[in-house]
């Protein structure tokens, strides 16, 4: 198969301070990449800024949460027949210079889903606070156990997909706090998962969507979702290889 | 044995419930599919309230010896839980459908802007349209 078209899917909620620079950076790294920004009903100028920087902007009519927003991007990728998709956070935490690393295993036909992990190498520079590190470890172990493959970073959100992955996530993507569950769904649907070491940046503007109060809900919700997802049947994705 | 007044109040309350639900359906303020569980609740409570011997027998089976009307409360609570659970599934489905619609709107709006852009280009530069 030829190189194929690649789309960058970026969910953004009130990220007017970061989104323009991010779109430019992606363009600088790869001219061929189409950039789609999912504006999750921001109250600031996120959509206008993204559009001014040359991104395709899809505007959700009301706030559907990050999972619902990202899935809109995958649905767009499916509709527009993109061969590959990458997903980056709208706050600039994911460095577009790492994209080629993420796409490489897919271009070689070795994986359907590549996750940019902060913990593949033990000496990676990312050292989160203790509670957060514990949470990340617990989820990673749980997904590894239930999915039958070792996963080191389930909350990264920095990923690349081939056509099979786009088809799966356009149809089946959890709506709130989606990253952990989506990883398990991918494994249980038979996608070939690879991880590559990436560095992440500190967010420059805006605030993280996960406040301290919500973290308890987050943990319980994700735990329940993982339990249910491992009891559910998912259609095996037929990958044209 | 159930006190007569308890049975009377039970009958009146269940008949009221049934009548209110029927009136809501008649006025199209409640869909038939969501009225069915409420009607079942009303009918079961009506039967258990009116049929005093039956309530006694059932209370005996369940080991409720001192005060048979407690079974009435238990059954009512059970049905309320059923109704609530049913509505939770309805809300979940509506939420999913809602998100699906929002996503479609976003996709369609973008496509519409692209099409309108093409149309505008055609009008402004007549050399493009040869027809």
Image: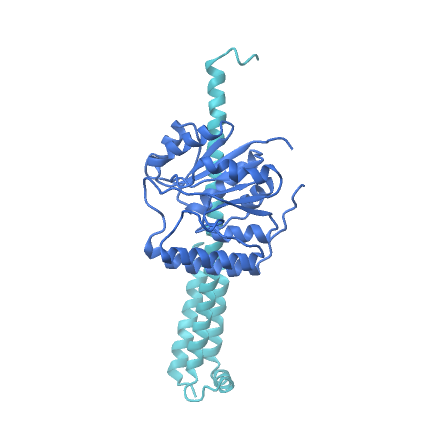
Name the image quarter holding the C terminus of chain A: top right
The colour style of the image is by chain
Q: Residue sitting at 32 percent across and 42 percent down?
A: A206
| In the foreground, B111 or A93 | A93
Measuring from the top left, give residue B121's x and y in whole percent: 47, 18
Residue A75, visible in the rendered structure: no
State the image quarter where residue B2 is shown.
bottom left
Measuring from the top left, give residue A231's x and y in whole percent: 57, 61
Q: Residue sitting at 51 percent across and 50 percent down?
A: A182
Name the image quarter holding the N terminus of chain A: top right
Measuring from the top left, give residue A232's x and y in whole percent: 57, 58
In the rendered image of this protein, does residue A233 appear above or below residue A48? Answer: below
Give the farthest residue toward the top.
B127
Q: Colour of chain B?
A: cyan
In the rendered image of this protein, does residue A12 appear above or below residue A216? Answer: above
| In the foreground, A236 or A126 | A126
Measuring from the top left, give residue A31's x and y in whole percent: 49, 27
User: How many numbered discs, if any?
Assistant: 0
Supply the letter of whichever chain is blue: A
In the rendered image of this protein, does residue A10 appear above or below residue B51? Answer: above
| In the foreground, B55 or A123 | A123
Give the farthest residue toward the front.
A123
| In the foreground, A107 or A125 | A125
Residue A119, visible in the rendered structure: yes
With A165 as the anchor, is B16 left or right in this view? left
Give the farthest residue toward the right.
A241
In the rendered image of this protein, does residue A23 appear above or below residue B82? Answer: above
């Amino acid at each position: 198969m030829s190189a194929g078209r690649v789309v960058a899917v970026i969910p953004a909620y009130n990220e007017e301070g970061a989104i323009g620079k991010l779109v430019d950076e992606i363009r600088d790294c790869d001219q061929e990449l189409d950039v789609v920004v999912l504006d999750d009903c921001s109250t600031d100028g996120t959509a206008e800024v993204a559009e001014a920087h040359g991104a395709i902007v899809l505007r959700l009519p009301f706030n559907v949460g990050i999972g619902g927003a990202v899935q809109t991007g995958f649905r767009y990728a499916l509709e527009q027949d993109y061969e590959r998709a990458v997903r980056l956070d709208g706050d600039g935490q994911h460095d577009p210079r790492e994209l080629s690393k993420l796409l490489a295993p897919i271009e070689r036909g070795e994986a359907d889903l590549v996750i940019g992990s902060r913990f593949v190498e033990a000496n990676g520079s990312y050292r989160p606070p203790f509670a957060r590190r514990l949470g990340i470890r617990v989820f990673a172990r749980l997904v590894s156990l239930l999915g039958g493959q070792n996963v080191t970073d389930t909350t990264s959100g920095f990923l690349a997909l081939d056509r099979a992955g786009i088809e799966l996530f356009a149809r089946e993507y959890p709506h709130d706090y989606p990253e952990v569950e989506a990883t398990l769904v991918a494994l249980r649907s038979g996608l070939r998962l690879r991880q590559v070491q990436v560095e992440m940046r500190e967010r420059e503007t805006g605030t993280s969507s996960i406040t301290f109060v919500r973290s308890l809900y987050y943990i319980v919700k994700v735990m329940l979702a993982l339990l249910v997802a491992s009891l559910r049947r998912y259609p095996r994705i037929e990958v044209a290889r | 044995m159930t006190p007569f007044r308890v049975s009377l109040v039970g009958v009146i309350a269940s008949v009221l419930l049934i009548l209110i639900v029927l009136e809501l359906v008649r006025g199209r303020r409640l869909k038939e599919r969501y009225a069915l569980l409420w009607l079942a609740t009303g009918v079961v409570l009506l039967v258990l309230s009116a049929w005093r011997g039956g309530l006694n027998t059932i209370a005996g089976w369940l080991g409720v010896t001192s005060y048979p009307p407690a079974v009435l409360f238990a059954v009512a609570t059970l049905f309320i839980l059923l109704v609530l659970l049913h509505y939770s599934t309805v809300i979940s489905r509506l939420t999913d459908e809602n998100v699906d619609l929002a996503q479609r709107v976003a996709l369609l709006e973008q496509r519409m802007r692209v099409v309108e852009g093409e149309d505008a280009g055609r009008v402004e530069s007549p050399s493009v349209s040869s027809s």
